[in-house]
Image: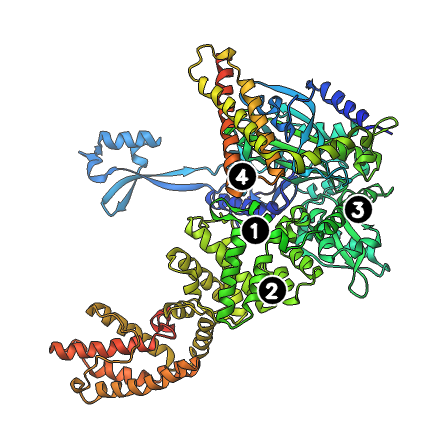
Amino acid sequence: MNRLPLLVEIGTEEIPDGMIAPALEHFRQLFAGLLEEQRLAAEGVRLQTDGTPRRLVLRAENLPERQPDSEEWVLGPPVAAAFRDGGPTPAAEGFARKMGVTPAELERRQTSKGEYLACRKRTAGRPTREILAAALPELILKIHFPKTMYWTARGGPRFIRPIRWLVALLGDQVVPFELAGVRSGELSRGHRLLGAREIPVRPGDYLEALRRNYVLVSAAERRRRIESEITRLLEGSGLRLRPDPELLESLVYLTEYPTPILGRFEADYLSLPEEVLVTVMRHHQRYFSLEDAQGRLAPHFIAVMNAAGDPEGLVRQGHERVLRARFNDARFFWQLDRQKKLEDRLPLLAHVTYQARLGSYLDKARRMARLAGRLARRLKADAALIERAALLAKCDLTTEMVKEFTELQGVMGGLYARQEGQPEQVWRAVYEHYRPESMEDPIPSTLAGRLVSLADKLDSLQGCFRLGLVPSGSRDPFALRRAAQGVVRILVEGGLPLPLRKLIGRDRALAEFFEDRLRYYFREVRGFRYDEVNAALAAGWDDLTDLAARLEALAAVRPTENFEPLAASFKRIRNILEQAGVAPAPPRRTSAIEPGRLEPGPEAELYGAFLRVRARVKRLRRQRQYAPALQAIASLRPAVDRFFDHVLVNAPDPALRQNRLTLLSELLGEFSAIADFSEIVTTQEEK
Amino acid sequence: MQTFQDILMRLKQYWGSRGCVIQEPYDLEVGAGTMCPETFLRVLGPEPYRVAYIQPSRRPADGRYGENPNRLYKHWQLQVILKPSPDDIQDQYLASLEAIGIDLAKHDIKFEEDNWESPTLGAWGIGWQVMLDGLEITQFTYFQQCGGLDLEVVPVELTYGMERLTAFLQGKSSVYDLEWAEGVSYGQVRLADEVQFSVYNFELADVPTLWKLFRLHEAECGRLLEAWPGCPDKRRFPLLAAYDQVLKCSHLFNLLDSRGALSVTERVAVIGRVRKLAVGVAQAWLQQNRKETA
């Protein structure tokens, strides 16, 4: 069958940079699904998507020209009712007529309900072009975007931005359809300012035709161009780029024809804090920062134009002027803000809303100081100092610098505190208290910073959960997931033995939320297996350093020979107890086991082993020697196996039976305090 | 060199020749050109409309006593509303830049995502900030909702920052050095304004008086909105006057804010009170204009 290339280009107004790559991936998936559903997913078909701010492009190679023909059996009346007196009945005649054949041409098919008359129906495959013309409008509108708009009129189609042109070509032929008042065709458009307004294209010459019109359709090609041009610009300059992959991605998707230019600013701006300069360049102007050979910030920057060149230097001058104005603002704020001490800004926080029902940032700062102080006293740290840092932490929200450059919150407070001569412990705690802002971001470097950060995040979590402002799906306006993840990382990686469960109080939703974050952290970030994480969590959690130690021990002991079989036995014990309605007994001093009722042999031996191992495990647990403790528990395996091989738990004598259940329940309870073994999925079960 | 007023007149000329009514500024204090009835009310309902006007936008908290070269208590926005939005609106917009002498082939233009929202007006839209060589010169917004209502046809709103554009074209780094008319600087025209209103807004505005005025205007608007449902002759009913009261309230709220007179809870509550009035007027206005066409 003939195979054809396909080109679909959705021409739009500028799509936000971060949304293009995910949309293209979804476009590809939707289209692959369509091919599958329409039996067009033949061997050798290749799909590729690419895009710029103004176009989402899907290209396919080797698409079959039409669907394969299909064949199906249509059943008529049962054979028993089809013939009478050697001739066809009216039912058989009617069926033959419906199928357009003579009764003699009908065949017979055996089904589970008996033999039926049947007719083979052949359907010729539809042309691919026709299928695509019918399916593409709906498919395009299904591409997911986080926020959509309508532009034709209320109730009209929704997309990320208005669709202005559509190219749809199968081979040399247009796939005809209409969407949002736009008819598909063979005309693309070039770069908004440098290219032609109408460009006839074919699937084979599309990329080249657009390149001639200053559009690099491939994101990879734009990325390469930015990188190689930057290298060229910096050659022999003594300047080095400070790599910024996130900014690079954003520029790749903000441009159709990216060209970097090298700009400079007056060296005396370097007297401003580097954090301020870099933030202004990166977040507000999307410029790359440069450094000199010694790694110091250089008075230069790289801007990336959506243009081919800047022969007269007009664009460079424009960017330099804007940056100068921004830096002047920053310098003005830096001078102005320092006229008022951070401490004196505290009352002003009463006018900054944290959340309508959770009060102002003054309220929050006071709560943070109380909590941070409590945590400090628990850890025998300098509570007065840490409370001071917590009180000052939010004061920079009233500075002009942070009002203008919100990304600098925390950092600015730290810089101002340092300028005022606050001790390093205090200013550094303020500076770092928003950390960690992502999985890659380090946690605060000092104890004071960690405690202030914990107090801030725990306060947000408790407050929001109390009001039912709980994240759901992709909605998390208060970034509570990040906050909880931060708490987990600070406690575990900072090695802080604090009772998290006590700190979050009795809020069950919040405890479950934390359990989710713990699962995520230990599985995805630390690489523990999911059943190990479940086992350690099921044994309870409070002090996360302890949880981490138990998990590490569990993962270490797991490959040893007795471990998994014992886990299987523990599961069996749990089932027996559940069936008997007996709960595993929590570890305690007194025992309800009556040794006198134990039968000599495997039962008494198990009891003996239990007592020995229990004493050892208790001692090891006190010392947090979890790996040897788990090994000791695993050594119970032969005794447990023999017990199950030779002893009937459900003994006819109720007192005997009760005593055996008690033995098992205390055994299970005692040895599940490090990890609940019954959560372990053994290799046996996986098979 | 093109003066501030040259640029303004050329843009008005440009949009006037594209079917826009050229309006003059609305004669009440507003925080943004969007708040003027020519935008806020005209975007409601199905009737096509095109208008352009220059509007001083007053933002008391942004005042800097005339000491900051880029920051102003009052700045000038050229507001353009095209309803419904034409398909080639981006091209028309870019051509307006060429009309004031910007050779686009020599510059770097980017449309960067920036969605606009005004909680006080129950309004939001989707769009961009237009960046010219790294300088934000225009807000470009497709309105989606206004007064809490989904709009029937989608208007586009272009808001040109006149000081920014002029600074770009004149190559000046301080707004006060811009040439407003030949031989007359922006500073000569406006500096006293900035100094005196900064002093008033930050230091001298009497808080109890502001509260009193706020409550008076709020009550007046409320009184009208209460009378609306029972009014027999809807066509004559002064909803426009009711809307003026909303604008007064909004400006008084901004003043109270710049005086630091609002606690957190008050701030949220007052925004809610103004929005209630704005939404009330928008809904009534829609009914009033339906009646006319019916």
Q: Which residue is mark 2?
A: A442
Q: Amino acid at mark 1?
A: Gly
Q: Vertically, is B28 above or below A199?
A: above
Query: Residue at left 68%, top 38%?
Result: B62
**Picture quarter with the N terminus of chain B:** top right
What's the distance in space between the residues labelled 1 and 2, CA to CA?
47 Å
Q: How many marks?
A: 4
Using the image, tell me which numbered label, if any, was put on residue A324.
3
The answer as to whether the residues below labels 4 and 3 share one chain is no
Q: Are marks 1 and 4 in contact (CB under 8 Å)?
A: no
Using the image, tell me which numbered label, if any, was put on residue A52.
none
- Disc 4 crowd rating (10 Å Cα; few below 14, some 14-19, many 20+) is some
Q: Amino acid at mark 3?
A: Arg
- Disc 3 crowd rating (10 Å Cα; few below 14, some 14-19, many 20+) is some
- Disc 1 crowd rating (10 Å Cα; few below 14, some 14-19, many 20+) is few
Q: Which residue is mark 1?
A: A44
Chain letter behind tag 3:
A
Q: Vertically, is A248 above or below A238?
A: above
